[in-house]
Amino acid sequence: LIRDKWLCVPCARKGLVTLATEVDHVISKEEGARRRISTVQIESLLNLQSICKECHKIKTTRENGGEPRPATGLDGWPTCK
């Protein structure tokens, strides 16, 4: 989180500034095992990113083979994430 200045890396790629509250494996542990990537590489700081809760939920859903539903605001309209 400190390295990424507490900002969500996936949001930043989209030009958004969002507070990161979680840390994510860029290549998941499961994908690393499938691709026979060493545990040392998977747990490396180079494979970690700061991420907001919404992006983490979307990424995890996709990794598990699902399609995430768009996030909605309090007004019920989809947010821009």
Image: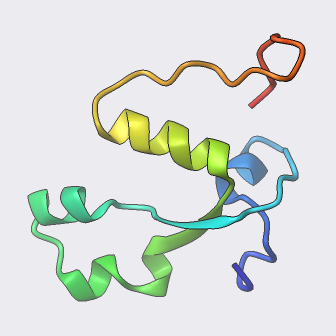
Q: Residue 17 in the image: x percent, y percent?
A: 88, 52
Q: Residue at x 22, y 56 (%)?
A: 31
Q: Residue at point 26% right, 65% down? A: 29
* As drawn, 4 above or below 54: below
Q: Quadrant of residue 61?
A: top left
Colour mode of the rendering: rainbow
Rendered location of residue 37, percent (x, y): 17, 73
Q: Residue at x 73, y 75 (%)?
A: 4
User: Is 24 or 74 nearer to us in this picture?
Assistant: 74
| Looking at the image, residue 46 lies above or below residue 56 | below
Whether 37 is drawn above or below 63: the answer is below
Indicate the position of residue 2 as horizontal and vertical percent values. 74, 85
Q: Residue at x 75, y 20 (%)?
A: 72
Indicate whether 12 appears above or below 65: below
Question: Where does the C terminus fall, quadrant-wise?
Answer: top right
Quadrant for residue 52, please give it. bottom right
In this rendered view, identify the residue nearer to me: 81 or 46.
Answer: 81
Quadrant placement of the N terminus:
bottom right
